Amino acid sequence: MPQPFSMAIHGGAGTILREQMSDELQVSILADLEASVRAGYNVLAKSGDALDAVVAAVKVLEDSPNFNAGKGSVLTNKEMVEMDASVMHGLDMDAGAIAGVRHIKNPVELARDVMTKSNHVFLIAEGAEEFAFEHGYEFIEQDYFFTDRRYDQLQSMKEKGLFALSESKYPDDKKFGTVGAVALDQHGNLAAATSTGGITNKKYGRVGDSSIIGAGTFAENGNVAVSTTGMGEFFIRKTVAGDVAARMRYLKEDVHTASESVIQGELKEMGGEGGLIAIDHNGDVHFAMNSSGMYRACIDVDGELSIKIYADE
């Protein structure tokens, strides 16, 4: 008998303010979140694998200019897009990751192919793209990723001498740019995927937590799948996704307790703002954040859809 299945996604956490959110933008964001979680859930409903579900969900967010991944990625100091992504499948704890790619429409797909079609876990920059083109990926010009919103953000950051998202006319400019998904399928498999454009005005090939297994992404059958979003340098130092899994594995904490302990604990004390989504082996979903909001949605084991933006919802 097939077991229960469920799905959750996020579109980034941080300072997301109602007073700066237009009705038009909110409607667009909510529609994207629903389309994403339904894309993943539809895979699960057809007895598909959790990995295929999280990739399908993340692709929807990568294709939207509303999120800092794929099409909506922020710009580097050199006015380029550099994207990172990772996936992990809980059955054999297989993983794939890529960083610093500039010409791949859906980085999450490439991360999956690194996992399934190579002997490696992590490929970067030109090497990752060489692998992609050998496997039939289309070369995507930078123009595809360029949006006026991200260009304006970059100019604002350059003027202020800053290298991260900051206050501006947008409701989420202090949002840490990541999208992600976690899923439990009907076969008991857990999977997670995370994708990002990084931070505005970044230099030197900077890479955050989104492509790092154990920091931004983690999945382990019988335990939990996690995707994070936040201040990458802090999330790397605290190995956030892996820490949630370890607390559940060794301390026998439930997914709610473990997630809150990590996000509201030492991570917050050291200045690490952000959040995570997690799903356990029973399909129980938890969203944790120490910020004012996180774009998020889930379809639970009863098939109930939930979409939220602000922390007080």
Image (tube, helix red, strand yellow):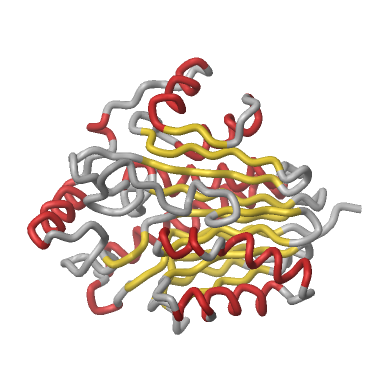
Left/right of residue 100 with respect to residue 287 in the rendered view: left
Q: Position of residue 51 (x, y in %)?
A: 66, 43
Residue 38 visible in image: yes
Q: Residue at x 57, y 43 (%)?
A: 55
Q: Residue at x 12, y 58 (%)?
A: 156
**Looking at the picture, does residue 69 appear above or below residue 164?**
above
**Looking at the picture, does residue 69 appear above or below residue 25?**
above
Residue 30 visible in image: no
Q: Residue at x 61, y 51 (%)?
A: 192
Q: Position of residue 208 (x, y in %)?
A: 42, 52
Left/right of residue 262 with respect to residue 222 in the rendered view: left
Using the rendered view, name the quadrant where residue 171 is placed.
bottom left
Q: Residue at x 60, y 36 (%)?
A: 121
Residue placed most toward the observer, 160 or 17: 160
Residue placed most toward the observer, 23 or 240: 240
Using the rendered view, name the quadrant where residue 126 is placed.
top left
Q: Position of residue 6 (x, y in %)?
A: 69, 59
Q: Residue furthest left?
A: 159
